[in-house]
Amino acid sequence: MANDERPVVLVTGSAGALGSEMCKQFLDDGYDVVVSDLREEAAIEVAKSLDPSGAHVLTVAMDVGSTPSVDSGIEAIIKRFGRLDVLVNNAGNFRQGLTSSYTDEDWRFITNVHLDGAFRCCRAAYPHLVKSPYPSIISIASIAGRIGLPGRLSYSVSKAGLEALTRTLAVEWAPENIRVVAVAPGFTKTANRIFVDGKEVTHEAFAQAVPMKRMGRPEEQAAVVVFLASKKASYINGQTIVVDGGATIDLRV
């Protein structure tokens, strides 16, 4: 069992650049960290790199697109640590295509993970968060939910839906001291490729569309998430913090 004084955070989608960076910063901040991803082997590698001893890290293979998988993952967390204090909804996937050629499967492929998956995790975490002295939920939205991005319909709609989920749960669960917030990253430099109007664009070229003339870094996004989970953010509830270098103010693609 973990030390009762160490809060426990679950980060879904932990195997990616942002997810793994959030896990690192939470661990550095004194949390016991649940590294969770559909890609179990990748999650195990992240966990080993963070804490080879495994004393403060747990790996859980979780498919947020499946209710049984989410429920089983939460059960494993409680069995190991006996508590859950922070949930970070970060799991995601991506598929690009124009709306005129979108299929039902294309739509569900994205929404079932980004939006439905976040709902499943919130619902499963709730009975345990209410027992925490400082519970919070942080969902990773996107500026895609605030601006028009052709070819990213279901992704953009899902991210906008995450903001609505955040606001609704923030009001419903505030009486139980559960804060629910979101972070909307702008264009962040990861291994992902960038396409504009069906053509691939380099990170360097795309950065020129951002007022700060650079893309964000995973550690910059992660730092905001860790802050929002902390006591320093104890009166921030129902809000979405945009971390985009000013892109939504003046994006020139």
Image (cartoon, grey):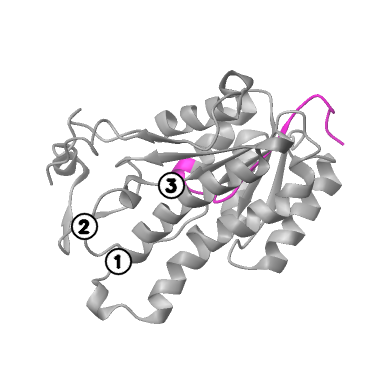
Q: Earlier in the sequence, mark 3 or mark 2?
A: 3
Q: Is residue 81 magenta?
A: no
Q: Are marks 1 and 2 in contact (CB under 8 Å)?
A: yes
From the viewer's perspective, tell me whether residue 252 is left or right of residue 37.
Answer: left
Q: Give the residue number, with chain letter if any, for mark 3.
A: 141
Marks 1 and 2 sit apart, C-alpha to C-alpha, by 9 Å
Q: Earlier in the sequence, mark 3 or mark 1?
A: 1
The kind of residue tagged 1 is Gln
Q: Which residues are magenta?
A: 1-18
Q: Earlier in the sequence, mark 1 or mark 2?
A: 1
The kind of residue tagged 2 is Phe
From the viewer's perspective, tell me whether residue 199 is left or right of residue 85.
Answer: left
The kind of residue tagged 3 is Ala
Q: Specify the quadrant of the image occupied by residue 197.
A: bottom left
Q: Give the residue number, with chain letter if any, for mark 2.
A: 195
- Choose mark 3 or mark 2, whichever is in front: 3
Q: Give the residue number, with chain letter if any, for mark 1.
A: 96
From the viewer's perspective, tell me whether residue 83 is left or right of residue 214.
Answer: right
Q: Is residue 8 magenta?
A: yes
Front residue of 10 and 37: 10
In the displayed structure, 88 sits above or below 235; it is below
